[in-house]
Structure formats: C-alpha cells, structure tokens
Amino acid sequence: MGSESDIDDDVAPKLMETNMLVWEELLSSPEPEIFGPRARSASDAGVLRRKGHLKEQDKFIQFLLDMHETHTSLEVMEKLDKWISEHRREPRASKLRRMVPTVEVFYTPLRMVEAFLEYDEFFALSRRQYVPPNFAEIRHILNIAQVHSSADTLKLLTFDADGTLYADGAHMQHDNDMIHLIISLMKRGVHVAIVTAAGYPNDADKFEQRVEGLLAAFSRLDLPKSVTDRFHIMGGECNYLLRVATCDKTYRRRLEFVPEEEWKSSYMMSWKQEDINNLLTKAESMLLDGAARLRLPVDVLRKERAVGVIPKGPTIYEVLEDLAIVVQTRLESDLPFCAFNGGNDVFVDVGNKLLGLQALMNYLNFSPEQVLHVGDRFTDSGNDSATRDCCPILWVANPEETYFFIHLMLQDIKRLQDYAYIE
C-alpha cells in the first residue's frame, strides 16, 4: 500500500479527468433518460442551469456573493479554503465566525478551489466580465466540494422527500431516476434513509405508497436482507422510524415500524401526550390567526403529532413564508417543534429533523463526518435547516439536481472503492 500522500498525488489527476467525463455525460445529453422527463424542456442547458430565487436565503452564501464586489471568484475560493481550514480548527474564534456569525460547522474538509475549477470548466464563471456568480452557482460549488469530501467516509446518506427525491406532492414511482442510484449505494455499503415531515402513525401502508417504486425494485431485484437492511424512513420529522421487513410469502418487500424503545432517545420518550396536544392546539390557533391576517382562506389538517394549514386557492410563496416565520418565532412550548413553509402549505410538527437524524445516527452508530443529508429547504423557514447542526448537507433545488450530485457522489465512491481493492 502506498502512503496517503502517494495516493493523493497519483489519484487526484485521474479523479479530475474522470469527473470531467461524468460532467460531460450529465450535461451534454439532450435525451430525457439522463435527467428524466421533467428536465426535457431545459436539457440543452443542463439541469444545473435551472435556477429559482424564492428559496435563496442564506447568510453564508450571501457573504460569498458580496465578496465578488471586490474579488474574482477564484480569489473568493482561495480565501474560503483558508478560512474553512481555520474554522475547522477553531470554530468559536475563527475569522469566518467573526465575519459570518451564523456560519455552521464544517464536519469535513472542503476544497473550494478545486470545486470551483471543476464547475468553471463547464460554466465559464471566470470568463464573465461583468456578471458575478449568482446564489445557485455558489450553492452548486459548495455541493461539489461536499460531494468529493464526503465520498471517502460516507456511511449514511439521508434525503428529504418532496422537492428532493420527487416533485412536491408526488411519490417515488417505478420510473424515478433515483432508484438505481439508491440501490447502487446500498450495494456498496451505504445506508440510505428518507427523513420526511410526512407522518402516518400505525400505518406503514401509507409510507409504502410514498416509495412504491423503490420497494418494487427491491422485490424485482430480489435484494438480500443484508442490502435492504440499509434502508430506513424517518417520518413525521422524528416521530416514526421504519425499516424493510422480512420478505413475506409473495417476496414483496414491505415496511415495518421499528419499536420506539429501540431508537428513540430518553428525551424523546419523555414527551407527554398532554404537552403534545397543547402544543398543537396553540399552533393551530396561531396558524389560523395568521391566515386571517393575511386574508388567506385555508383548510386545517391535524394529525397525531402535526398540524397544518392548506390554502384553499392559489397563493404566493412569500405569504406562506411569513405565516411560517411568525409561528416559528412566537410559538412558545417546552417541547421542540418545527414550523415550516412546505411550498404549498404551512405545518407545525412536534420535534424536528435534527432530532430525527440524530436518533437515526445513534441507532446505526454513525458519526457526523460519515453522514450526509440532502434537502431543498435550508432557508430560515425550511425544515431541513436543523440538520446542519449534526452533519454535512447538500442543498438542492429540485429532484434533477439531486440526481446530478448523487450520480457524482456514486462515481467518486466507485473509484475510491475500486482503487482500494486494486491496491
């Protein structure tokens, strides 16, 4: 075996060359099989050119954008490489912390210059003369750096559901492009979990409907238990954990609830039903008051550990954002909760994804640098934001971006594992 430095020197150029081939495959094909039918209208530009602005709020990324008033993109990334390294050594006293007090922990090292050069090869940011990078482009570069950093240590990959794995309000159908990537990761030893706000107490069938295509693929491929044991769903933010059950006589893969005492923390087990009911009642009242203030007719949906309002007619994102933030900042409770803008509704859940992901990490015995969470709601009112406190993240805007970055991740993992096997 060569030393770590020998491996880096030998492999780095090969990794970059292979990355370029992956990028060319993902971005150049005009055919829908690369990204799926939803990307067809923008296939000539590539999925990473599809940008929106409604969910683009982040103080750290805004700080990097502001730097472009006096720096080139390469200069920004060169400084960021140094600042991140220092921040990892001294997070409380780092220069980055002084400049961006809300900056999160970096659980793995990030090579921002390398990520920028890789992205720049295809999108020519450095060749622009008057237009600096936008929010989405900086987000993409951060994602690329995180993908390459996490590939070597990844043991648990978690996903938000709506807007990340599939379109809002949809399910994982049989033709979902993520299915083969998820199975490939599981076969290579990576645990995969969906961490979602959707919660159906004592009803595994409804959870199965959300991932019908994936479970059907498990059955069709007759995956062994050693592989399917690597799949979980954390529902209701942190309230329900499911796993793949032992095959029935039809060999159909089903889901079953993991007993609470096997995975819930003592803190989560201590929540009293009376306190839960009081929290949901106050949340419902605040949601209705806010909807009336905003002149927004809504229907109320109350569940065992969640309550939400659904607009009766068309509205705009900013209205839901205001409603969520008001509840988030003014609702008082001894229990943890998550008030979030789901894009088409506003919900308040008991608990949050931080508690759910921490419980899952403890259950599977993984540390932060071995985990990566992928989601599309990392703004102040998003329910993915809390996961930043326990592991690295990838911030995506749609399922097509998820496919792109996880495809890139899988290629890295294949190269690293195959290289280690050859050695």
Image: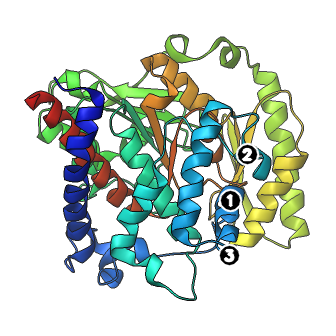
Q: Residue at x 47, y 17 (%)?
A: 363
Of the two numbered discs 1 and 2 in the rendering, the one whose residue sits closer to the viewer: 2
Residue 395 versus residue 134 in the image, above or below: above
Instruction: Name the foreground residue: 153 vs 258.
Output: 153
Q: Earlier in the sequence, mark 1 or mark 2?
A: 1
Whether residue 367 sits left or right of residue 88 in the image: it is left
Q: Amino acid at mark 1?
A: Asp
Whether residue 135 sits left or right of residue 309 in the image: it is left
CA separation, marks 3 and 1?
A: 29 Å
- Could you tell me residue 47's position as x and y percent? 37, 72
Q: Which mark is residue 294?
A: none
Instruction: Name the foreground residue: 365 vs 10.
Output: 10
- Could you tell me residue 388's position as x and y percent? 61, 41
Residue 78 versus residue 367 in the image, above or below: below
| Residue 413 sits in quarter | top left
CA separation, marks 1 and 2?
A: 18 Å
Q: Residue furthest bottom?
A: 130
Q: Amino acid at mark 3?
A: Gly
Of the two numbered discs 3 and 2 in the rendering, the one whose residue sits closer to the viewer: 2
Tally of marks? 3
Q: Residue at x 81, y 23 (%)?
A: 274
Element at label 3: loop
Of the two numbered discs 3 and 1 in the rendering, the one whose residue sits closer to the viewer: 1
- Could you tell me residue 207's position as x and y percent? 43, 40
Q: Which mark is residue 313?
A: 3
- Which residue corresponds to mark 2? 95
| Residue 298 sits in quarter | bottom right
Q: Which mark is residue 58?
A: 1
Whether residue 227 sits left or right of residue 377 in the image: it is left
Q: Earlier in the sequence, mark 3 or mark 1?
A: 1
